Image: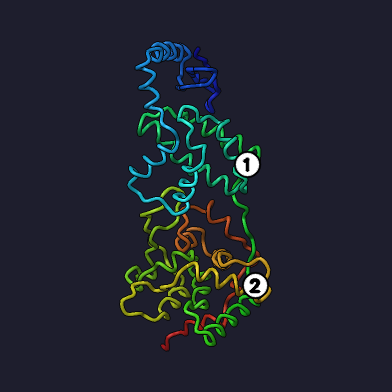
Amino acid sequence: MGAITPRKNKDGSTSYKAQVRIRKGGKVLHQETQTFAREQAARVWIKKRETELADPAGLKKAMADDPPLKDLIKRARAETKKKWGLSKNNVLKMIEEHAFSETRCSHLDSAAFVKFIGGLGVSPSTADNYFSHIASILKIARPAWGYPVDEKAVDDARIVMRRMGLIARSNTRDRRPTRDEMNKLMDYFSKSNSTRGDTVPMTSICLMTLYSLRRLIEICNITWNDLDIEGCRVMVRDLKHPEEKQGNDTWCYLTSEALRIILAQPKIEGEPRIFPYAPKSASMAFTNAVQALGINDLVLTDLRHEGASRLSEMGWTIQRVLSISGHRSWQTLKRYTHVRQIGDIWADWEWLDKVAPQAAS
């Protein structure tokens, strides 16, 4: 027996969600949903589908066109031209191995999402990340392949889970390093390099993060061929973007300090990268230094946020800061910008001259 559920749209109009379910032995064997602008159209569709599904051949065909979630993920991975980012790929691999991935398209309603996400046992921000990756697959399933996915159920689930606190954006950090803390870190790294011969020049990495506003993985991937000295800019490969994980190559301008730091790096024969180091090693070195020095709650990314705050405090316009950071809008950048005073608190900082001495004029 089919059912019709009226829904109010944002523009005040009413749409009608039609649903057909086929049961066997008390269990839902197959279900389909379709949304219509008119109730009469919904009734006609229900009658048509019930007639078609009453035929065993029709039901078999419908079930073949109603694959489980894991098959959607596999097909999306195979047919999507843009390579997935590491995070998305790992999350979806985990979901493929979960029992939830056996759920067929037509059974993916908001209640199913709430039950799955609620049972993951992860933080709301991590759960939000998981659900976003699932949603990115489901949003293309009907228009691209004709699978019976109810996109409205995805939107409903997101609203419900936010209200329940199951998913949430990550907390915004406002931790800013002090000049004294940075002096201690730079001194620590300088001594480490000279006594232990550490391969990662953390003094350069820290300054580059602060003055360029670049992510660590971006810094470690920049090549000499990506550098435009005359234009004071650099090509950032696969710049992080909420939708374009790969192939989003973008020219970003450099502050004069960042260009100085780059030009101070030695060119290594056969090595195209300017900072040819493993991001994980640099991140670990920073974490170890912070712990050794007893500095509380400071991570390497905070230096990047400090760089954005610094430029804003120096009176740079929003557009000019965006041209350095690579963000698309102030809305995304402002999460990392925490203005507290006017002027450059890093002016005349001796470590810039130590790491990247000014060329004699």
Q: Indicate the position of residue 128 as horizontal and vertical percent values.
A: 56, 45
Q: Amino acid at mark 1?
A: Leu
Q: Nearer the viewer, residue 136 or 213?
A: 136
**With 66 as the anchor, is 296 left or right in this view?**
right
**With 116 as the anchor, is 225 left or right in this view?**
left
Regarding mark 1 in the picture, which secondary structure is present there? loop
Q: Nearer the viewer, residue 132 or 30?
A: 30
**Location of residue 301 (image quadrant):** bottom right
Residue, far front: 25
| Numbered tag placed on residue 291 in the rendering | 2
Q: Indicate the position of residue 325 as horizontal and vertical percent values.
A: 48, 61
Q: Amino acid at mark 2?
A: Gln
Q: Taking 272 as reference, is 12 above or below it? A: above
Q: Indicate the position of residue 347 as horizontal and vertical percent values.
A: 57, 77
Instruction: Name the residue: 37% across, 13% down.
Output: 55
Quadrant for the C terminus in the image: bottom left
Q: Nearer the viewer, residue 192 or 255?
A: 192
| Numbered tag placed on residue 166 in the rendering | 1
